[in-house]
Image (tube, rainbow, N blue to C red):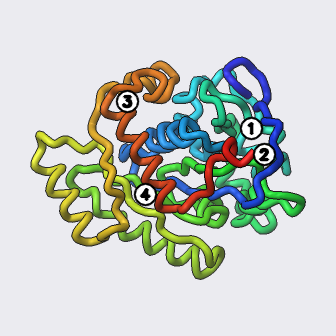
């Protein structure tokens, strides 16, 4: 549901000829800016004119809260999408950003890891609902905010996605665990999803006053090369303030360094994915 309880609005244009680009935003380490990136990247893509769906697959539900839907006002969401055979169109809701829809984390999602174990084709529950047989979903991008773990929820996101975007915090031990995640991506690719690839790493919480940030960034670029996005997300208090107000940074303070960095990241992502023009430009 939207902050007003309305279902997501639909444009009058026909569905796009191509399927949406599905990106899982994942890192098994918490506190790296994963949800912040999901909220603000989705917003920036929508501001560019793309139709975007953000799926909050984290039981903590911070992406939903950060887009103005508090815990008490949530109804059916990502749990219903995976476990109750509900459709995206049933569950997607409006946000404060035109062209950005959300499937929120609902109250039952915390128990989904256990329930999924006994479900048929448990690894494909999300992939099947995001790849309907009748027609592609009417979005240009679908972003999935994964929980900070490598359990069945994240596995479902990786099986459903075409690529994985990894936020990497510019702090000590940041690179530890990324190699594990990349190995997991490769295992999922071989076993479940041959099209899955690493979209890239995004350096977050970068502080130019801190030599450690520069060292982590240099190490990441030395090891991963051009898989690291050129755009760097700075440590910015306005981003944190925005989330506490249930808004993306672009709405809270569009001139802040954080909001502008996510705008640049969205532009770079579009270039890297060779995305079609925004849906509005094709209608």
Viewer-nearest residue: 86 or 195: 195
Q: Residue at x 55, y 56 (%)?
A: 24
State the separation of the CA atoms marked 4 and 2: 25 Å
Q: Dot 2 lies on which element?
A: helix
Q: Residue at x 15, y 57 (%)?
A: 215
> Which quadrant holds the N terminus?
top right
Sequence order check, earlier mark of 1 and 3: 1
State the separation of the CA atoms marked 4 and 3: 19 Å
Sequence order check, earlier mark of 4 and 3: 4
Sequence order check, earlier mark of 2 and 3: 2
Position of residue 183 in the picture relative to residue 101 (left or right): left
Instruction: List the residue tagged with mark 4.
Output: 166
Q: Residue at x 35, y 26 (%)?
A: 255
Residue found at the very far right of the displayed protein: 134
Q: Position of residue 83 (x, y in %)?
A: 79, 51
Residue contact between numbered discs 2 and 1, judged by CB atoms under 8 Å: yes
Instruction: Determine which of the numbered discs, if any, sits on residue 88 in the image.
Output: 2
State the separation of the CA atoms marked 1 and 4: 24 Å
State the separation of the CA atoms marked 1 and 3: 25 Å
Disc 4 packing (10 Å; few <14; some 14–19; many ≥20): many
Q: Is residue 61 above or below residue 216?
A: above
Sequence order check, earlier mark of 1 and 4: 1
Q: Residue at x 75, y 44 (%)?
A: 283
């Amino acid at each position: 549901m939207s902050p007003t309880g309305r279902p997501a609005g639909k444009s009058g244009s026909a569905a796009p000829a191509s399927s949406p680009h599905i990106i899982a935003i994942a890192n098994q380490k918490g506190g790296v800016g994963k949800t912040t990136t999901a909220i603000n990247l989705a917003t920036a893509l929508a501001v560019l004119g793309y139709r975007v769906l953000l799926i909050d697959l984290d039981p903590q539900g911070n992406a939903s809260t950060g887009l103005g839907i508090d815990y008490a006002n949530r109804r059916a969401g990502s749990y219903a999408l995976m476990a109750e055979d509900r459709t995206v169109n049933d569950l997607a809701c409006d946000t404060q950003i035109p062209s950005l829809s959300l499937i929120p984390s609902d109250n039952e999602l915390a128990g989904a890891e256990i329930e999924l174990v006994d479900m048929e084709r448990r690894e494909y529950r999300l992939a099947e609902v995001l790849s309907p047989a009748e027609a592609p979903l009417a979005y240009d991008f679908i972003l999935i905010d994964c929980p900070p773990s490598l359990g069945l929820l994240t596995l479902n996101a990786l099986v459903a996605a075409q690529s994985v975007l990894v936020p990497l915090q510019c702090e000590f031990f940041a690179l530890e665990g990324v190699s594990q995640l990349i190995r997991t991506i490769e295992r999922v690719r071989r076993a479940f999803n041959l099209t899955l690839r690493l979209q890239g790493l995004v350096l977050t919480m970068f502080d130019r006053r801190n030599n450690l940030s520069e060292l982590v960034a240099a190490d990441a670029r030395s090891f991963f090369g051009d898989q690291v996005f050129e755009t760097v997300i700075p440590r910015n208090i306005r981003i944190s303030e925005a989330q506490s107000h249930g808004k993306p940074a672009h709405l809270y303070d569009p001139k802040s360094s954080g909001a502008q960095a996510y705008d640049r990241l969205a532009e770079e992502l579009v270039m890297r994915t060779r995305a079609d023009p925004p849906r509005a430009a094709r209608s």
